[in-house]
Amino acid sequence: MVNTTIKTTKSQEIFTAAQNLMPGGVSSPVRAFKSVGGQPIVFDRVNGAYIWDVDGNKYIDYVGTWGPAICGHAHPEVISALHAALEKGTSFGAPSVLENVLAEMVIDAVPSIEMVRFVNSGTEACMAVLRLMRAFTNREKIIKFEGCYHGHADMFLVKAGSGVATLGLPDSPGVPKSATSSTLTAPYNDLEAVKALFEENRDQIAGVILEPVVGNAGFIPPDAGFLEGLRELTHEHGALLVFDEVMTGFRIAYGGAQEKFGITPDLTTMGKVIGGGLPVGAYGGRRDIMSMIAPAGPVYQAGTLSGNPLAMTAGIKTLKLLQKPGTYEQLERITKKLADGLLKVAQETGHAACGSHISAMFGLFFTSGPVHNYEDAKKSDTTKFGRFHRGMLERGIYLAPSQFEAGFTSLAHTDEDIEQTLAAAKDVLSSL
Ligand code: KE4
């Protein structure tokens, strides 16, 4: 039994049954609450900044379905646009003007993107971009960073973050050595390590892929000069620089982390926000590179539901809402209030803690820090994080169920929501 003060009878019934039907009872590992303990709550509906579970409990949501709900869940304008689109069918498997519209919006927004291809998930986008990097440079090796997560494709499951970090699966069973033998890793924020890899693997590295702001090892921003250094190193060695902006895209800024930090990668992957809650991933970049993708070029990549009209509609409407003046100032203000407040409460209640935020993404570690990379993050007190998570859940606050995830705010979060959250945090942390 889960010892919570909130009534979770129906959640427990449904989740117990789910465990007989689906591995771990979930469709994605992090949802099982393995690293924070206790059973997950089963959602009934979401709206704005809020969740209601099947027992009728209401929560303020700081996961936002892992990023897509940046305008708030079930935004009325997105819902009504979807209703209209539904009348015309759910999938075409053929060109539609909606793909042109969203493609143009992404190209106009993201500095590195001259052409874009839509897929159905961030994983697909990262898989495709890896194949493209290798084809364009005619080199095989790639560099990724410990704790960064680029989806669950074999070649990325090397010291990955997110659910892999949470479940301590640095190299998942079933991944053949051949799939990862060309994947080199370095600590995040460590330019010297990257330089050494380039020296040791001269003319063999197709490119470097990273989360420009890490969200899958907990929240870890780039140190000053790190992104610039990678841009210089990749140029120097004839390798490509790829920003995985599946999480940071349209969240760190309208043009993503690359706009915020003024660094232009050669290729970018996206997802989450650009689907407005429906399955969309995308990759894009320089025209000379993207033109290699079939059928324009020889690099094969395909997908039955890619660019489907419902997902395009939700993405178009979401980006339109984000274009409104003042959007990112509001996201920065509300998230700063939350992140600074959480840190203050943790320190006032005598807990070693560090954390930060950039725009609508934030994180908190129970360690005095600083946290510059995954090794630092792993030194944090994950047991305390689990107890904090459960305590907040019992007080109606839904945080990401793992220390190795980031937190997400939205345009729907109000000052009152933040104040309620900080009061709950004070209550929980005083009792830990
Ligand atoms: P998906 O295949 O889950 O759409 O995207 C994979 C991916 C790629 N790149 C980055 C930077 C990502 O954050 C993700 C997915 N993020 C996780 C949250 N840490 C999705 C949540 C989950 O796995 O259930």
Image: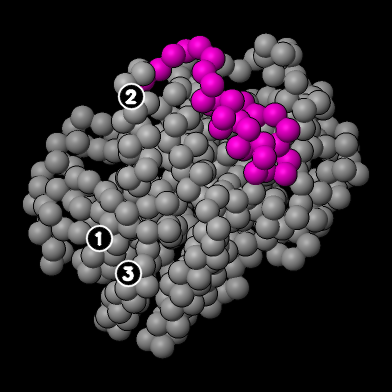
Say which of marks 3 and 2 sits in front.
2
Image quarter hosting the C terminus: bottom left
Image quarter hosting the N terminus: bottom left
Q: Are marks 1 and 2 in contact (CB under 8 Å)?
A: no
CA distance separating discs 3 and 1: 10 Å
Q: Is residue 4 visible?
A: yes
Q: Is residue 263 above or below residue 142?
A: below
Disc on res. 86: 2
* Amino acid type indicated by mark 2: Leu
Q: Measuring 86% from the left and 50% from the top, which residue is drawn there? A: 232
Displayed quadrant of residue 417: bottom left
Q: Is residue 170 visible?
A: no
Crowding at mark 3 (Cα within 10 Å: few <14, some 14-19, many 20+): some
Q: Is residue 212 above or below residue 306?
A: below
* Amino acid type indicated by mark 1: Tyr
| Element under disc 2 | helix
Q: Position of residue 326 (x, y in %)?
A: 54, 62
Q: Position of residue 295 (x, y in %)?
A: 67, 11
| Residue ID for mark 3 | 417
User: Position of 299 compared to 355: left or right?
Assistant: right
Q: Measuring 44% from the left and 45% from the top, which residue is drawn there? A: 68
| Residue ID for mark 1 | 59
Disc on res. 323: none
Say which of marks 3 and 1 sits in front.
3
Which stretch is magenta?
Answer: 90-119
Q: Position of residue 48 (x, y in %)?
A: 32, 54
| Element under disc 1 | strand
**Is 426 within the magenta?**
no
